[in-house]
Image (spheres, rainbow, N blue to C red):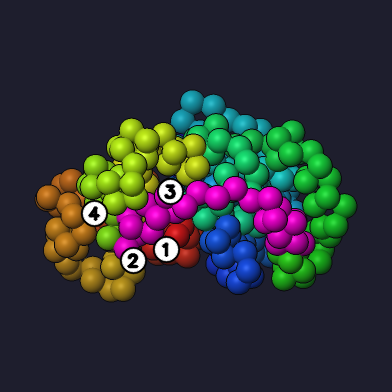
Amino acid sequence: MDGTTNDSAIDVSALPCAEDLSPFVHRHMHGQGRDGRSGSLRIPPTGGIFLSYVPGSPLAVHFTDRTCERRPRFFIGGQLRREQPLLVSDGRFELIGTELTPTGFYRLFGRDASTYTDGIWDFTEEFPEHAAWLDERLNDDAPLAERIAVIEDLLRRLTDDARETPRVDAAVREIVSRRGMVNVGELAEGVGLTSRQLHRRFVRAVGVSPKHYAKIVQVNEVFSALLAGDYEHIRALALEHGYFDQAHFIRDFQRFVGMSPMRFLDSGSAFLRTYLGKASR
């Protein structure tokens, strides 16, 4: 696998979640090959864990040092710290990804989110009862809205027993409100924890450190500004969003998005333009 993508053959849309699930679900993402075509998608970090449903052909998921062949019908996509997995279908491509809020997975499913970071996990093996419930009710040929409603019904069933993470949620809100430009020590003090306590709780509930999550938010903020049309002001955008120089910004953008800002602007990637620019809140 050479790492290239074929997202030009895939239509991508972002759909809102039901209002009552907003503390747990950020949005739903739907990708579908045009005219039943195959395709591939490179997945950048957004700050949330995904519960993914594959009604199309099974996917192979390529990581830096390994390939997960023929992913099952339901899988968990963990937070991304060092990886940008490439999803590849050799038949009809269709994927529905439910992006959870930063603490949504931990709160609903009660598992340490860092266990899933930089990996793809079979939902049926991790949560067999929930997977069986979905499998029984999901019709791959049903309208998209009906399939998303089934996924939301499962998540809604879990909300009564959801864990509470008030201090981590407060830290997430502060990071987002300050566009990722935070000092972790000050952030911890603001939520009544030591830096070590915040790091430990944040990694367990979110899957990555507060510093790394802040970087995801920061890059997404710059990405949003680029999408707004400020193409000739990359240096100014970088400085505005907390980067000390243009080279620093370009390195981070390359690491998180997989290409330079100028290459992104030239690529016209519909997938990246839909996927990024709105980090998980």
Going from N to C along the chain, the mark reached first, 3 or 4, is 3
Gap in Å between the C-alphas at discs 2 and 4?
16 Å
- In this figure, which residue is indicated by the disc labeled 4? 181
Name the quadrant of the C terminus. Answer: bottom left
Q: Please report the residue visible at 59 percent of the width from the left and 48 percent of the height from the top.
A: 163
Residue found 81% across the figure and 66% down from its top: 142
Return the residue at label 3: 168
In the depicted view, which residue is nearer to us: 186 or 220? 186
- Tags 3 and 2 in contact by the CB under 8 Å rule? no
- Marks 2,1: beta carbons within 8 A: yes
Q: In the picture shown, does residue 12 fall above or below 172?
A: below
User: Which residue in the protein does label 2 denote?
Assistant: 224
Task: For residue 29, say whether it is visible.
Answer: no
- Percent from the top left, x then y, of residue 71? 68, 39
User: Which residues fall within the magenta stretch?
Assistant: 150-177
Q: Distance from label 1 to label 4 (Cα)?
A: 16 Å
Residue marked by disc 1: 278
Work out which residue is located at the far right of the displayed protein and give it.
136
Crowdedness of circle 1 by 10 Å Cα count: few (<14), some, many (20+)? some
Residue 237: say if magenta.
no
Label 3 SS: helix
Q: Residues within 10 Å of mark 2 (few under 14, many from 20)?
A: some
